[in-house]
Image (cartoon, grey):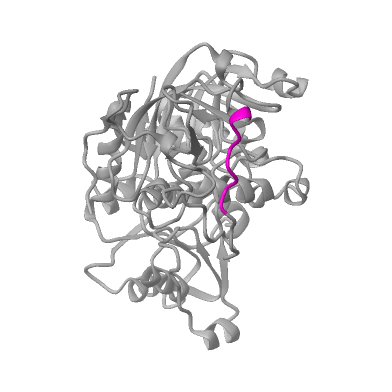
Amino acid sequence: MAFAPILRRASAAKNLFSLSRLSLGSSPSVRSLQTGASGDDRQPPPPLSPSSIAGYHVSSGGYMRGAVYREPNQPLTIEEFHIPRPKVNEILIKTKACGVCHSDLHVMKGEIPFSSPCVIGHEITGEVVEHGPLTDHKIIQRFPIGSRVVGAFIMPCGTCSYCAKGHDDLCEDFFAFNRAKGTLYDGETRLFLRHDDSPVYMYSMGGMAEYCVTPAHGLAPLPESLPYTESAILGCAVFTAYGAMAHAAEIRPGDSIAVIGIGGVGSSCLQIARAFGASDIIAVDVQDDKLEKAKTLGATHTVNAAKEDAVERIREITGGMGVDVAVEALGRPQTFMQCTLSVKDGGKAVMIGLSKAGSVGEIDINRLVRRKIKVIGSYGGRARQDLPKVVKLAESGIFNLTNAVSSKYKFEDAGKAFQDLNEGKIVSRGVVEIL
């Protein structure tokens, strides 16, 4: 499968596909998320009423472009939208950069069901341009107009039972509305096409656009010392790695760790593990260029799984014991098994790679029971507490942002960026500049 590198610019011309022909409540072209993280069935998103669409963005006073996914394995389209308007405790951001992530690619390939058409992109930096009506004054004080921000892909509501306990990564509204229905937490999108007012869904905040709206709890201030472009990866690649290391793996100084799959998130795990004081840091991949890059990001050992048995090599490096923590950052059944087999007795196998819907990982039950192997899933960090810490790691230089971004693209080349990602041409992380 390959994506055409050319993005087709959509306009109001009649010969282009019109969203007005879709019925958001019944069209088979619009799919809701079929299964969530727990495998529960999801209902199709409710139709958006014309009254909620009309008058919502009419006074926005301008237009923007966004990258739209319509159906699997088809090129993205650059389309014109009304500039979105934020609601209570939401913030409108002028997007400066957006990361290129495998999660978007899974959606674009039809491997993870998501409501369509939608604007992709979920790790962003930008400038605050508007607060929603009745937004809490503390939010306005923290994020004044003109301030620089970075956005996390998990956008906590701040009020559900999980958020109340500080578990922003399990936010009920995020999964029930955004991941299941492609909307924000009132059940409505903020995105409407310029030429016919048709609604378009949002993958997280729909960050691959010139403007985006996000709940304020998913943001953190971005210091002037950090660049917009490279800092975009803080909201997903680094944020996901931090959540895995801090909350799932609970890395301690002196721990040994193996990271399987050295892409944007896996390579960030190397840097975070080093920051947490891990000793042996083993990078596993099948591409030599990624393994060479891994050495500059904190890896003390590298293993090419295409040339040698990864599990045997990891055990050899650790004196036959296995590692304290193994991280699977690819999302494949084979690497899931490698991850569980690489840990020592009592060790932790942390799964952070998303896979094609319905994929199943296998594990030796007897070893799991007898040797107290812990298998832990980790989707991301906790935005309100972790995103500021991630920013601090970058600001202090402990996390090297410049070294973590290997490819940059213009907004018009977003389609090529995802084609390169699909073909394994992005060594660590790619970022689309929307300055």
Give the residue displayed 58% in from the left and 44% down from the top: 178
In the image: residue 410, left or right of residue 331:
left
Viewer can see residue 37: yes
Front residue of 325 and 181 = 181
The image quadrant that residue 208 belongs to is: top left
* Residue drawn at 57 percent across, 57 percent down: 251
How many badges with numbers are in the image? Answer: 0
Percent from the top left, x then y, of residue 101? 40, 44
Q: Is residue 279 above or below residue 348?
A: above
Left or right: 330, with 423 as reference point: right
**Figure quadrant of residue 252:** bottom right
Asked where in the image residue 37 lies, by quadrant, the reply is bottom right
Range drawn in magenta: 44-51
- Dominant secondary-structure state across the stretch colored magenta: loop
Task: Pick the quarter of the image with the N terminus.
Answer: bottom left
24 in the magenta segment: no
Relative image position of residue 292 (x, y in whole percent): 26, 50
- In the image, residue 88 sits, relative to residue 43, either above or below, namely above
- Whether residue 378 sits left or right of residue 360 in the image: it is right
Residue 138, percent across and down?
A: 76, 23
Residue 49 is inside the magenta segment: yes
